[in-house]
Image (cartoon, rainbow, N blue to C red):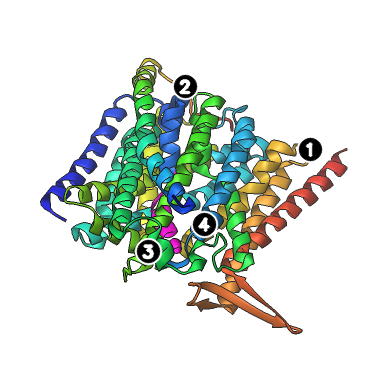
Amino acid sequence: MTTADAVVIALYLLGMLALGWAISRRVTSFSDYFVAGRRMTAPLLVCTLVSTYYGLDVLLGTSEVSYQEGVVAWFAYARPYYLVILVAAFTVARRLRQYRFLSLPDVGAQFYGRGTQAVLAVASFLYSLPILGFMGMGVVLDVTLGIPFVWGVLLGAGVSVAYTILGGLLADALTDTVQFVLMTVTLGVAAAMALGHIGGVDVLRERLAPSFFRPTGTYPVGVLVVFALAALSAFVEPAFYQRIFAARSYRAVVVALLVGIVLWAAFDWVVAIVGMTARAEGLSTEPRYALLELTIRSLPVGAKGLFVAGVLATAMSTVDSYLLIAGGNLAYDLYRPLARRPLRDHQLLTLTRWMIGVAAVATIVLALFFRTVVSAWIFMSTIMAAAGFVPIVGGLYLKRLATPTAGFVSSVTGILVAGAYYALVHVFGAFDPEWATQIWRIEAGGVSAALWQEYALLFALPASVAGFAAVGAWERRRGG
Amino acid sequence: VSALAFWTWLAIGTLVAVPPVVFAFFLRDARGILRDIEADDGPTDGGGAA
């Protein structure tokens, strides 16, 4: 990296701060702040949806899987999400637009009351803490500029927190538009240059094993099923919900999601191919950083700085959105219903800004505490889906069973079963270095089973469905 | 051209060409969104659906 590259990165960070400051002067109400006054049009939604949903977990995680396994990273892990988002666009999104919700826990409050709202708020808060984003920014600034990890985390987080606190969702969305263009275009150019460097795409077939081009790779069937099931979390994605509520119209949501699916598919595919290119190049690095090292090696001076700014943009566009949601969960979803006197609009606005700061501090503490971040992230996703999927879909489509107790029992059962499963796998299982995860191997009566910690949702979702159906049916019978 | 090369270059082309077009459409809308927010005082309570 040269001085020119460092200047490009510094200009990017200052530009984000300036944008947040400019927006803050225009935001006067909580609705303006939290859902951009429900004025977001399709192009703005495309930019913010695509950039928010894709953070460093996708950029580094997908390239890591493709570096080790090949195109299965796209076919098995990424593709189910497009299908779920497509279904959600024409079902859940349409139904949600019939209400005046501001947040995902609002859905719980509408159908089941404060208990379920509080459970969903806690699950959403935990899910939204951008631990991986904070750590990723620290790693990127360390690898590229030599800034010590802790200072990198504080610098990246500090800039994201500052403009999010200042301008809310609109600042988040406007910075997302710049970050969206930066992250997609720089990735496309970097991939083209890296592929040109090795002599074209088809060279990959000559240098890599045939299993790299098998859509199912070498994963066990159970893991492929879990990958597909994990995509259901898109149905209870807090950022996805916030953007549906912030949209100017339902049509804008559908257009944005359809364009978004095309862009997500292209982004995932290119990231997967770059990961495979790094492997074909014989790059001996930690798989997670293969994409970073390959592209930085392939790009000329100046373009490197632009690419690092693009990588930071990928992280920051996710970090800002989820910090806003986590702050909103504390102020709007948890504190506001418990306050003795109704909060005035400006009080709620101020409190949310403070809570974003609290969420940022909680994230920094966890980012420095957790060593296996991916495991922590999978756990949080599982908790979110286990707590929210059944009560939300039940409230929207099974109103006859959706009693307050059914929603609460379903939500709590999902969390408890997921938590208990994780506890059992960690107490009785062991870390498997081959798959880099915790696995509990059981043998009884000549039958053996390998229970991965990632299977928690396979148990939690049916338990949540059973709790919802049993309590809903019982209360219905008792009531009528 | 192999299928692998075709889809890869199509994906790269999509990443490089589509976002600037979306951004151009966004610029058309942005001024109106900011003007609307400046003109509107917004709700006076912290109410949502709950």
Give me the residue at 57% from left, 42% from top: A85
Seen from this angle, which residue lies furthest left?
Answer: A3
Residue at the spot of label 3: A288
The first of marks 1 and 4 along the sequence is 4
* Circles 2, 1 touching at the beta carbon (< 8 Å): no
Residue at the spot of label 4: A380
Mark 1 falls on what kind of element? loop
Q: Quadrant of residue A22?
A: top left
Image position, residue A182 (x, y; %): 31, 41
Tell me where the magenta segment starts and ends, as one range. A53-66
Q: CA distance from mark 1 to mark 4?
A: 30 Å
* Circles 3, 2 touching at the beta carbon (< 8 Å): no
When the figure is inspected, residue A8 is found, relative to residue B37, above or below; the finding is below
Mark 2 falls on what kind of element? loop
Q: Amino acid at mark 3?
A: Arg
Q: CA distance from mark 3 to mark 2?
A: 46 Å
Q: Amino acid at mark 2?
A: Pro
Residue B11 image label: none
Q: CA distance from mark 2 to mark 1?
A: 33 Å
- On screen, residue A166 versus residue B7, left or right, reads left
Residue at the spot of label 2: B43
Tell me, yes or no, whether the highlighted magenta stretch contains residue A54.
yes
